Amino acid sequence: MPTQPEERIVRPARNVHGSLRLPGDKSISHRYGMLAAFAEGVSRFTNFSTGADCASTLSCMESLGAKINRINNEAVEITGVAGCVTPSNHSLDCGNSGSTMRMVSGLLAPQQGDFTLVGDASLSRRPMERIRKPLEAMGARFTLTDGHAPLMIHGSPLHPIDYTTPVPSAQVKTCVLLAGLQTTGTTTVREAVRTRDHSELALRAFGATLTRTIDSVSISGPQSLHAIDAAVPGDISSAAFFLCAAALFPGSALLLDSLGLNPTRATLLDVLTALGAHIAVLNLEEKNAELVGTVQISSPPEGLGSTAVSGALAAQLIDELPVLAAIAPYTSGGIRIRDAKELRVKESDRIDLIVKNLRAMGAEVAEFEDGVDVPGGQTLHGAAIDSGGDHRIAMAFSVAALRANGETVIKGSESAAISFPEFFNLLDLVAER
Ligand code: S3P
């Protein structure tokens, strides 16, 4: 059900201070939810993502026969279908979630029955050819509308493939692996850049066997999955907004505990360190093969320096680039972002909205097809921000607003709930005014 557009006023802050524990990682929650719903037995998760995207995954899996039980807002209990879904008479609504649509497609292509997947206006504009190609190469029967959702799958047994992803994408990799899990023979996915590996780690946690090399992952099917109990680590892509906010204020001190620090996701810590932020990682431990720890950040008295993000780094930082671009004017030397064309096909054209909103705040910025150049040493003023209904744009510019002169109005602020419903409350908690 689409919610009404809302507005939020974000006032400048004097400092960022405090300690937070963040809700569960969106990428891991999608995978745990999907795999638990497909596995045999009852899985139980604490700190499951509170975002609307993961709720879309759970409701699709519920329509396919899994039982979802939310226990007092504290845990999610999922009874799986033991490898055999029930085709639904209704369309499966993936909402705003590309992860749900692309990954569930891989799970369903080898199943019996017909399935229709739909999404909201934003998801219905996003490219789905990238999953049609490998799934059709496996023999799947698949219909798209002009390369987009609605998407129809006529499930049938598949054959294994050896597939190289043309664009680095963990969602596409996962889609193929989930089809491979149910397909006799060995399916291999090769990627030029190691994208987030939560699927590989989660599949192993649910009892599957995979083999990995430096640039490939293989799964031999068919294999069955078994229920697990797990605590989902805090979401580092949500933490990114707070880490960047703290990095903006000399004298800031922020502590984030139980945070997911999977090396395929934690590149932002290196970038912030390169910009001059002081970061310490403490209490590192492994939970279901995912690294979890505490991050302490403070900003240097002289402020942030400059950096450039391109090549493999751009792919690994793809969800954090909007907030990095939004804080770039406040650095001394600016931030250059390239090789990030994928930003144009996310929940919105994020390059377009980064440029438009930085300019609305009075910043100078140069736009490129695959990135932006944002000079440093700039003073920004509060403005009306067009989030384009994109959660990461709404949150990124709320962070930029903390150092602007005057108030900023975030239009479409309700979109933060796609990944992080608690965002504005937590921002108020740590932003000193
Ligand atoms: C995700 C992968 C990335 C990322 C998205 C979540 C995932 O998308 O941008 O927010 O959970 O696998 P792509 O696979 O399209 O790069």
Image (spheres, rainbow, N blue to C red):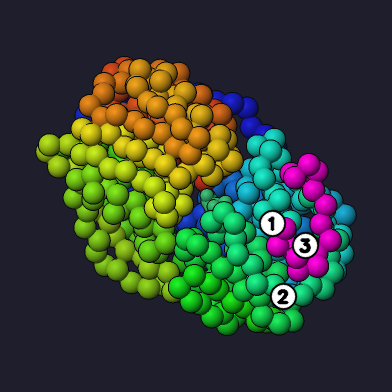
Binning the other alpha carbons within 10 Å of mark 1 as few (below 14), some (14 to 19) or many (20 upward) gives many
Residue 28 percent location from the top left of the image: 52, 61
Seen in the image, is 203 located left or right of residue 368?
Answer: right
Q: Quadrant of the C terminus?
A: top left
Q: Identify the disc placed on residue 131.
A: 1
Q: Is residue 326 above or below residue 70?
A: above
Q: Is residue 29 above or below residue 390?
A: below
Q: Depth check: 372 or 428 in front?
A: 372
Q: Where is residue 410 in the image (x, y as percent from the top left)?
A: 46, 25
Outermost residue on the left side: it is: 301
- The crowding category of the residue bearing disc 2, from other C-alpha atoms within 10 Å (few below 14, some 14 to 19, many at least 20), is many
Query: Is residue 360 visible to the viewer in this orientation of the structure?
Result: yes
C-alpha span from label 1 to label 2: 15 Å
Q: Mark 3 falls on what kind of element?
A: helix
Identify residue type, mark 2. Pro
Q: How far apart are marks 3 and 2 (CA)?
A: 11 Å
Segment tinted magenta in the rendering: 133-150
Is residue 136 inside the magenta stretch?
yes
Q: How many marks?
A: 3
Give residue 310's position: percent from left, percent from top: 39, 47
Earlier along the polypeptide chain: callout 1 or callout 2? 1
Amino acid type at image mark 1 = Ile
Which amino acid type is shown beneath numbered disc 3? Glu
Checking the image for residue 160, the label placed there is 2
Name the residue: 71% across, 51% down: 129
Placement of the N terminus among the 4 image quadrants? top right
**Which image quadrant for residue 173?**
bottom right
- Residue placed under numbered mark 3 in the picture: 136
